[in-house]
Image (cartoon, rainbow, N blue to C red):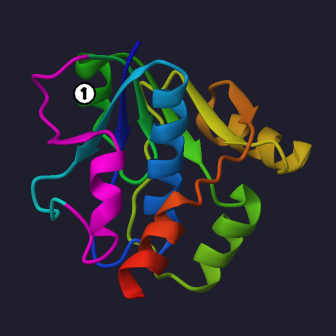
Amino acid sequence: MKIGVTARFQNSYFSGGQPQVALALSRALATAGHDVILLRQASDPEWFIDVQGFKSKTASRVVFSSDQHYDLIIEATWCLSPEDRRKCADRVVYLAHFPPIFHDMESCVYQWNPTQRNFQNLAAIWTYDFYTAQDVRYLEFLAQVPVQQIPYVWDAEALDVATAEVG
């Protein structure tokens, strides 16, 4: 299966959880035998300022284009437009990796997140299996699509590479 995973390569690999989630998930899917491609925005750098030795151990990185087509796109760090979702993949899922209810409550108090959510043309939402049934119902209510819980994936290899690079 040809799978695209949205990813960002800004600053350090360790400057936030989103790049770690995207890369760990993409490596797990590649290990399972899928053809995985990391999709980045044209305005983003090609790679992080650190973990250079990890770059060759990850999926290929391409600038997203609406001319590409995938069996599945997983929106892990940034989202496609509803039109691109329909055009570029047979199925698009959004990975809600932050605790859904807590994240939204915090965003109401501290309005630091400029992201505008749009659930149009999503096939499903994935969230971790350790979040509550209440989180799942909340996402189902907001998006009006099925919500599936998946296991958390962790990949320690980037940490090993960073430790070796720093010395």
Percent position of residue 20, x then y: 49, 60
- Horizontally, residue 160 falls left or right of residue 67, namely right
Kindly identify the residue that appears in the image at 63 percent across and 29 percent down.
144
Pick the residue in front: 156 or 43. 156
Percent position of residue 126, x then y: 64, 36
Asked if residue 33 is positioned above or below residue 79 in the image, the reply reads above
- Horizontally, residue 71 falls left or right of residue 25, namely left
Picture quadrant of residue 107: bottom right
Kindly identify the residue that appears in the image at 27 percent across and 67 percent down.
52
**52 part of magenta stretch:** yes
Kindly identify the residue that appears in the image at 41 percent across and 54 percent down.
77
Mark 1 lies on a secondary structure that is: helix
- Horizontally, residue 133 falls left or right of residue 78, namely right
Quarter occupied by the N terminus: top left
Percent position of residue 167, x then y: 42, 88
**63 part of magenta stretch:** yes
Pick the residue in front: 126 or 160. 160
Question: Can I make out residue 29 in this image?
Answer: yes
Q: Which residues are magenta?
A: 47-69
Circle 1 Cα neighbour tier, 10 Å, few/some/many (<14 / 14–19 / ≥20): few
Asked if residue 110 is positioned above or below residue 121 in the image, the reply reads below
Kindly identify the residue that appears in the image at 64 percent across and 53 percent down.
154
Amino acid type of disc 1? Glu
Q: Which residue corresponds to mark 1? A: 83
Percent position of residue 161, x then y: 43, 68
Picture quadrant of residue 141: top right
Asked if residue 122 is positioned above or below residue 18 in the image, the reply reads above
